[in-house]
Image: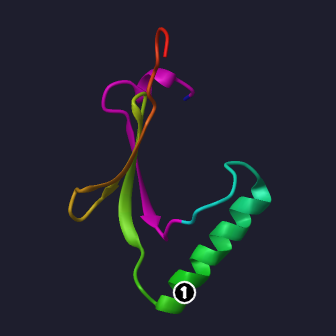
Amino acid sequence: MNDASRFAGAGVDFKAKLIGAEDVSEARGDKMCQIAMAKLKAGVKASRDHKLRISVNVSLDGIRVVDEKTAVSIRHHCHCHYHGRV
């Protein structure tokens, strides 16, 4: 199903596990992503902590990461539309 209208309104929820966050120098590149993921996975494995269960909501308004247990929003990346002059 390739219907963009499913992201309208409340959007679509995806269940996931959060292994961490890593600052990166640029927003593109497979190699950069592989290095960041390797660091995060090694950190989780070394700490023996459980990964945080999250829900990733994708809608036309943006992306929201929510802690499944507490229902608290961890991160929201707004997809803002700017109209007119800035």
The location of residue 67, given as percent across then percent down, is 30, 60
Reading the image, the residue beneath label 1 is: 45
Callout 1: SS: helix
Residue 11 in magenta stretch: yes
> Colour mode?
rainbow
The location of residue 77, given as percent across then percent down, is 43, 42
Q: Residue furthest left?
A: 70
Relative to 57, residue 29 above or below:
below
Q: Which residues are magenta?
A: 2-21
**Location of residue 11 by image quarter:** top left
Relative to 73, residue 43 above or below:
below
Residue 52 in magenta stretch: no
Question: Type of residue at label 1?
Answer: Lys
* Residue at figure coordinates x 24%, y 65% from the top left: 69
For residue 64, side relative to residue 21 (left or right): left
Q: Residues within 10 Å of mark 1 (few under 14, many from 20)?
A: few
* Residue at figure coordinates x 46%, y 12% from the top left: 83
Foreground residue among 68 and 72: 72
In the picture, which quadrant includes the N terminus? top right
For residue 7, side relative to residue 73 (left or right): right
* Residue at figure coordinates x 48%, y 90% from the top left: 47
* Residue at figure coordinates x 36%, y 54% from the top left: 55
Relative to 12, residue 24 above or below:
below
